[in-house]
Image (spheres, helix red, strand yellow):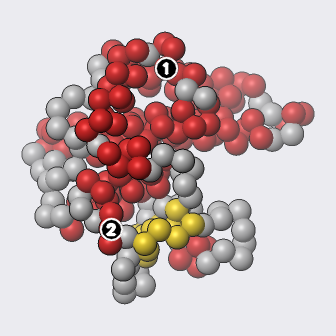
Amino acid sequence: MPILRYSAASPYARKCRIAAELLGFGASLALVGADTTDPADSLRAQNPLGKVPTLILDSGETIYDSRVICEYFDLLAGGGKLIPAEPAVRVAALTLQSLGDGINDAALLIRYEATRPEPLRSSDWIALQAGKLDRALAALDAAPPAGPVTIGHVAVAAALGYLDLRFEGAWRAKHPALVAWLDAFADEVPAFEATRL
């Protein structure tokens, strides 16, 4: 049984877990927690970057990061399921995935910076990352993801879930169309709620 090394709070791991469920692999995936800050955690031997998610196959081979893991799942399911085969639709889905992952990147950088001792924190750095979040959320609110669920939809949903978890859903007040989209996504994709921390 393949093993997904993960952290329940990781939006990238959540994206993989949702993708696995949508593609029918959820029940055949063992979830094993990882502590990325612990030098003794075997994760560092499984993935030299020491990051989650990391997928360990029955052969012992490892696959990382979330984009590659999700593509692997899609290929196992026959291809073209969450990552469309038709070029224009595929590029749109992958671009949307990049936007969702970029929201996660910026949110994580803000969170890490906020945990540094006060004298070491950079308000300019936080503002730079917050600007990325603001622009990404505004773009998504103006044009929420549409059409059949792709990896882009999953990435955006996981990112919004992370903002709810770590930033108390502050994004919701300014982005009602995106809130409505996420509610509809949660209704359509039970794995979204099932993977909530």
The amino acid pointed to by label 2 is: Ala
Q: Residue at x 61, y 36 (%)?
A: 166
Image coords of residue 7 (percent x, y): 56, 58
Image coords of residue 134 (percent x, y): 51, 20
Image coords of residue 9 (percent x, y): 57, 50
* Furthest residue in direction right, as rendered: 119
Q: Earlier in the sequence, mark 1 or mark 2?
A: 2
Seen in the picture, residue 77 relative to 28 is either above or below; the reply is above
Question: Which quarter shows the N terminus?
Answer: bottom left
Marks 1 and 2 sit apart, C-alpha to C-alpha, by 32 Å
Q: Residue at x 32, y 25 (%)?
A: 181
Do we see residue 132 in this rendering?
A: no
The amino acid pointed to by label 1 is: Arg
Mark number displayed over residue 32: none
Q: Report helix, strand or loop for mark 2.
A: helix
User: How dense is the environment of label 2, judged by Cα within 10 Å: few (below 14), some, or many (20 and up)?
Assistant: few
Q: Residue at x 66, y 74 (%)?
A: 41
Query: Considering depth in this image, is 153 or 105 the residue closer to the camera?
Result: 153
Image coords of residue 80 (percent x, y): 14, 54
Looking at the rendering, which quadrant does residue 73 occupy? Answer: bottom left
Mark number displayed over residue 172: 1
Do we see residue 109 in this rendering?
A: yes
Query: Considering depth in this image, is 102 or 57 the residue closer to the camera?
Result: 57
Contact between labelled residues 2 and 1, with CB atoms less than 8 Å apart: no
| Left or right relative to 109: residue 19 | left
Q: Report helix, strand or loop for mark 1.
A: helix
Question: Which residue is denoted by mark 2 in the rendering?
Answer: 27
* Furthest residue in direction left, as rendered: 86
